[in-house]
Image (cartoon, rainbow, N blue to C red):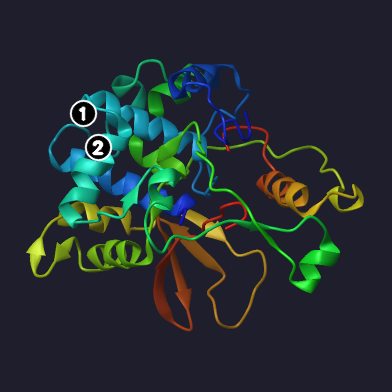
Amino acid sequence: MPIASITKAYTAVAVGELVAEGKMDWDKTPVNEYLPEFELKDPVLTKQLTMLDLLSHRTVCKPLRRLPNIMQCNLTPPQLNLALILYSMNRTCLT
Amino acid sequence: MTMSWFRNKTPRQELIKRLRYIDTPSKLTSKTNYSNVLYGVAGEAAASVAGMKYEDIVRTKVLKPLGLHNTDFSPLKMAKTPNHSVPFTSDSFENAIEGLFEEGPIRDDFDAHPAGSSLYADITDLVNFGNAIMNQGRVDGKQVLNEETINEVLKGHSIMTRPKRDLENAPVLTYGMGWMIDTFKGQTVYRHSKLALFF
């Protein structure tokens, strides 16, 4: 079965093994040093973000200004399913 | 960019390059702001350091050492195992209420950022992974995963609030790394939610 977001636990452990090998660290080196092509709009934030910030979801997202009333859109269950995911995310970025 | 990772064939490196154009607030927070995309970035950072694909890091550092032979990134590989799950859907609410669902095909699905969402596993493997984590990385008394790693991923690093108060759960839980650290009737619970369409 798809374990979907439970994958994140495997990713964190895999990164942790690299930390244990001394190839990375959780909270000292900016991610940008490991992966120079990763930049956010704010260069200061780019230089601050660590692996721990990414893996524990510590960045900020802007909420949407207005949410559509999807329950009135007469969607089929599969469409509604997807719409509800988007709706529940309630973010404009990075989700 | 909100769901840019979802069923997107754009190369993950290209999606990461686009992040610089998104208008994000310029601060870090103690509150959990769930992001699949940034898990993708973490996966690629690890790949860059290790000199191998993200998927191969998970295979060599986690799946193989733990003997999780029925866990991998391919839905088609999953479909070849004898007791795999299959997706179901219904074409109307009326049919869904009546219990009329149709079995859907297992597609060669893909997420642009596999680090946040793309593993497939059977129940035995999932339980064995959970047991290894709860036993500080030990399997049959042998230390397989790094103990400090397990301690670190199970520490609360950001704060999640429960939208509704109830008597059984504490009003606040925390997010570690890939784990939610929760309470239920006074007991600590390490858990994670998942959402997979039609499964």
- Marking on residue A81: none
User: Residue farthest to the left?
Assistant: B142
How crowded is the residue under tag 1: few (<14 C-alpha within 10 Å), some, or many (20+)? Answer: some
Q: What residue is disc 2 on?
A: B57
**Type of amino acid at the residue the image marks with label 1:** Ala
The x and y percentages for residue B111 are: 50, 36
x 34%, y 62%: residue: B126
Q: Are marks 2 and 1 in contact (CB under 8 Å)?
A: yes
Q: Is residue A85 left or right of residue B120?
A: right
Residue with the mark numbered 1 = B50
In the displayed structure, does residue B8 sit left or right of residue B64? Answer: right
The mark that comes first in sequence, 2 or 1, is 1
Task: Give the camera-side residue of B53 and B154.
Answer: B53
Check the picture and name the quadrant holding the N terminus of chain B.
Answer: top right
Nearest-to-viewer mark from 2 and 1? 2
Q: CA distance from mark 2 to mark 1?
A: 8 Å
Name the spot of residue B184 as percent of width and height, x first.
48, 78
Query: Residue A69 location in percent, x, y?
Result: 87, 48
Q: Quadrant of the C terminus of chain B?
A: bottom right
Q: Chain of mark 2?
A: B
